[in-house]
Amino acid sequence: MNSSLHLFPLPVLNETPAVSVVATLLQDCGFMGDKLCERRYLAGTEFFRYVTFAGCAPQMQLEMPAEGGWDFCHISLHQDHQPPSLQVANLRGRPRCPTCRTRVPAWQEQLPGWRKDASQLHQCGNCGAVLPVAELDWRQYGFAARCSVEIHQVYPGEAVPADGLVRLLKDGTGRDWRYAWVDKPVCEKMDIPC
């Protein structure tokens, strides 16, 4: 499985909450456990209280495999992507204008540039709204943000954050939070260390 669930604060291009504040919130509530390295953590003892999985008996590997690598469910904190890069769940993400709900035509051709810099402006051909690509509506199958909490090894649609997790992040940072499922970046698939 090469996809993750990300939680990120709104507005996506504004100054981010301090990663230390987010880390403290998530460790204090038990969502995140022990630190694995600079930005990666084990799932905490209360992890399943804050994430709801589809199906009756999800099989989640919560410990690092004996042979090493990052192919197990764990959590990463990301901050200050400058410029923010767009991340999309392949074959699922289809952007719409958030103002008029019209689909963005020919977006696949623009995707390579958007992946590098989602602060680029896009003008809707229907309503004329001009907004950063990061603010397009990817219907939870794509996002761009300067800060995110990543839950690794979660298939798109398989899990959602519980209301309590979103409320905890909002109350602790003073920002609304959203979520999206995306495919892992190439460096993650190549097992580049943190």
Image: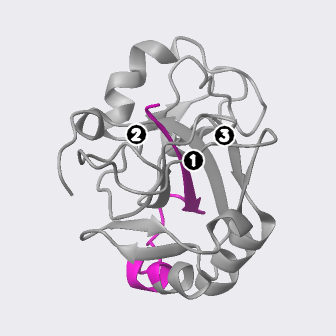
Residue that mark 2 sits on: 120
Magenta run includes residue 50: no
**Residue visible at 52% across and 58% down?**
12
| Residue 180 at x, y percent in the picture | 61, 45
Direction from residue 147 to residue 47 in the image, left or right: right
Closest to the observer, 75 or 147: 75
- Residue kind at label 3, given as amino acid type: Gln
| Residue 45 at x, y percent in the picture | 59, 75
- Locate the C terminus by quadrant: bottom left
- Residue kind at label 2, given as amino acid type: Gln
- Tag nearer the camera, 2 or 1: 1
Looking at marks 3 and 1 on the same chain, the residue that comes earlier in the sequence is marked by: 1
Q: Secondary structure at mark 1?
A: loop
Using the image, determine if residue 29 lies above or below residue 36: below
Q: Residues within 10 Å of mark 3 (few under 14, many from 20)?
A: many
Using the image, determine if residue 124 lies above or below residue 63: above
Residue that mark 3 sits on: 140
Q: Secondary structure at mark 2?
A: loop
Label 3, label 2: how far apart the Cα atoms are: 20 Å
Residue that mark 1 sits on: 60
